[in-house]
Image (spheres, helix red, strand yellow):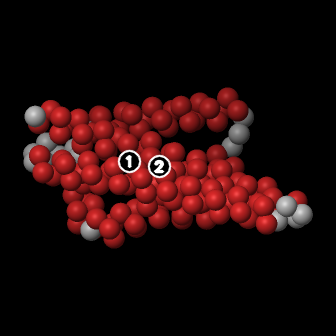
Amino acid sequence: MLKRIVLPTLVVVFVIALTMVACAVTPWMYIDVASFVLVPIGPVLFMGLAFGWKAAGAAFSSAWTPGASRRQLESSARFFKGLRAAIWSFGGLGAMIGFIAVLSNLTDRARVGPNLAVALVSVLYAALFDLLVALPFMVASTKRLAEAD
């Protein structure tokens, strides 16, 4: 079961690395602390508080624990569905904050680029966090749930 989580994640990492090499860019271009706090950390905190920290931890473990019950797998699938929605909501929020900052500072050319980067990197982080964390665990949970029938 672990291979159903790790292998898809490695494919995403490989495709991203290959794209970065093909575009001749450095990984440092994609680091933005504000976007990182907003997108990966925000949804995890939101879901941990909304779903409960114990239930959130159980959702991660039951996705690949062989002895997980049907009820645990259903709860895990619901958690990751909610996490995916939260990831994209926070990513959209980061994009809107960045775009508003761009539009409010159009006369200051020095601030347009960094503010636009916040908008775009927030969406990028949402896509990466979804592809690397939430989607593989959700697929693993739902696949195991379907096999339980």
The picture quadrant where one finds residue 136 is top left
Residue indicated by mark 2: 129
Q: Tag 1 or tag 2, which sits nearer the N-term?
A: 2
Q: Is residue 2 left or right of residue 68?
A: right
In the rendered image, is residue 19 in sight?
Answer: yes
Q: Residue at x 56, y 36 (%)?
A: 16
Q: What x and y, as percent, mark residue 48?
A: 33, 66
Q: Dividing the image into 4 quarters, which one contains the N terminus?
A: top left
Q: What x and y, as percent, mark residue 62?
A: 19, 50
**Amino acid type at image mark 2:** Phe
Q: Is residue 71 left or right of residue 133?
A: left
The picture quadrant where one finds residue 91 is bottom right
**Amino acid type at image mark 1:** Ala
Q: Residue at x 27, y 61 (%)?
A: 56
Q: Are marks 2 and 1 in contact (CB under 8 Å)?
A: yes
Q: Residues within 10 Å of mark 1 (few under 14, many from 20)?
A: many
Q: Residue furthest bottom?
A: 49
Q: Which of the numbered marks, if any, corresponds to residue 123?
A: none
Residue indicated by mark 1: 134
Q: Dividing the image into 4 quarters, which one contains the C terminus?
A: top left
Q: Residue at x 66, y 55 (%)?
A: 119
Instruction: Between residue 22 and residue 91, name the one nearer to us.
Output: 91
